[in-house]
Image (cartoon, grey):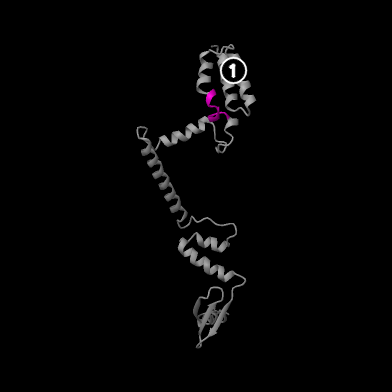
């Protein structure tokens, strides 16, 4: 077969693979037969009919429209993926051993991802999250962050109310209306800090 004919037949194979309809496929197949001299007994054409033409749904584009491949359906990319799998498994292993190995590797990868996700300093920030809370989330553990975030939400919520009951001087009971949680507060601490600031300011003049 002449080199020019080989190139044309190869081009026809590409048209067959990416045929968008039955008409396109039949036209490409007829053209390929003409390139081979119109001889249906030609070895190449015979091989095509016996091994490819009878399984079009497996490789012709218009018959594989319902297969989810995310446009990543070219043979070289598929071979690339298989090549990466071959790097981590043994070719002499049985099918059940290969499946077990791949599942184990998948679980290991998931564990690594979860560990990285929960690592202090790697927590992702939501689009509506408070900037101060997001900055704090990069410095503390997820458990500590959840505790702080809960209190932060109560403190910044517009409908948060507290019931205050004054006890002995300097003491008060504060109850959150939304949570029902009760705190005993030493009100003198804030008072002492305020007095210290005022005194320090007077002494500095």
Q: Name the one closer to the observer, 51 or 92.
A: 51
Q: Name the one closer to the observer, 46 or 107.
A: 46
Residue 178, percent across and down? Answer: 56, 73
For the point 54% across and 68% down, which residue is it?
A: 152
Query: As displayed, is residue 119 above or below residue 164?
Result: above
Q: Which residues are magenta?
A: 53-60
For the point 50% across and 18% down, which residue is it?
A: 47
SS for dot 1: helix
For the point 53% across and 13% down, which residue is it?
A: 42
Residue at the extreme right of the image, as rendered: 23
> Badge 1: few (under 14), some or many (20 or more) residues near its Cα, within 10 Å?
many
Q: Answer with left or right where residue 56 lies relative to residue 86.
A: right
Please tell me whether residue 91 belongs to the stretch shown in magenta. Answer: no
For the point 52% across and 76% down, which residue is it?
A: 180
Per the picture, the main secondary structure of the magenta-coloured stretch is helix
Please tell me whether residue 54 belongs to the stretch shown in magenta. Answer: yes
Q: Answer with left or right where residue 191 lies relative to residue 83.
A: right
**Residue 197 falls in which quadrant of the image?**
bottom right
Residue 37, percent across and down? Answer: 58, 11
Q: Number of labelled discs?
A: 1
Residue at the extreme bottom of the image, as rendered: 168
Residue 113, percent across and down? Answer: 45, 50
Query: As displayed, is residue 170 above or below residue 68?
Result: below
Quarter of the image where the C terminus is located: bottom right
Residue annotated with mark 1 = 32
Residue 151, percent across and down? Answer: 53, 69
Query: As displayed, is residue 148 above or below residue 47?
Result: below
Q: Name the one closer to the observer, 53 or 175.
A: 53
Query: As displayed, is residue 73 above or below residue 197?
Result: above
């Amino acid at each position: 077969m002449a080199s020019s004919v080989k190139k044309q037949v190869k081009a026809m194979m590409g048209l067959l693979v990416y045929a968008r309809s039955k008409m396109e496929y039949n036209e490409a197949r007829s053209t390929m037969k003409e390139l081979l001299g119109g001889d249906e007994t030609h070895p190449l054409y015979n091989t095509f009919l016996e091994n490819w033409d009878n399984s079009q749904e497996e490789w012709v584009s218009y018959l594989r429209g319902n297969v989810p491949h995310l446009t990543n359906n070219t043979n070289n990319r598929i071979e690339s993926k298989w090549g990466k799998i071959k790097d981590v498994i043994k070719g002499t292993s049985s099918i059940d051993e290969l499946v077990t190995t791949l599942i184990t590797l998948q679980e290991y990868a998931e564990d690594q991802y979860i560990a990285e996700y929960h690592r202090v300093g790697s927590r992702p920030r939501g689009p509506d999250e408070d900037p101060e809370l997001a900055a704090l989330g990069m410095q503390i553990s997820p458990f500590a962050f959840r505790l702080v975030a809960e209190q932060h939400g109560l403190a910044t919520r517009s409908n948060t109310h507290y019931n205050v009951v004054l006890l002995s001087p300097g003491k008060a009971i504060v109850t959150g209306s939304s949570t029902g949680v009760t705190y005993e507060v030493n009100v003198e601490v804030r008072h002492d800090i305020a007095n210290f600031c005022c005194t320090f300011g007077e002494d500095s003049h």
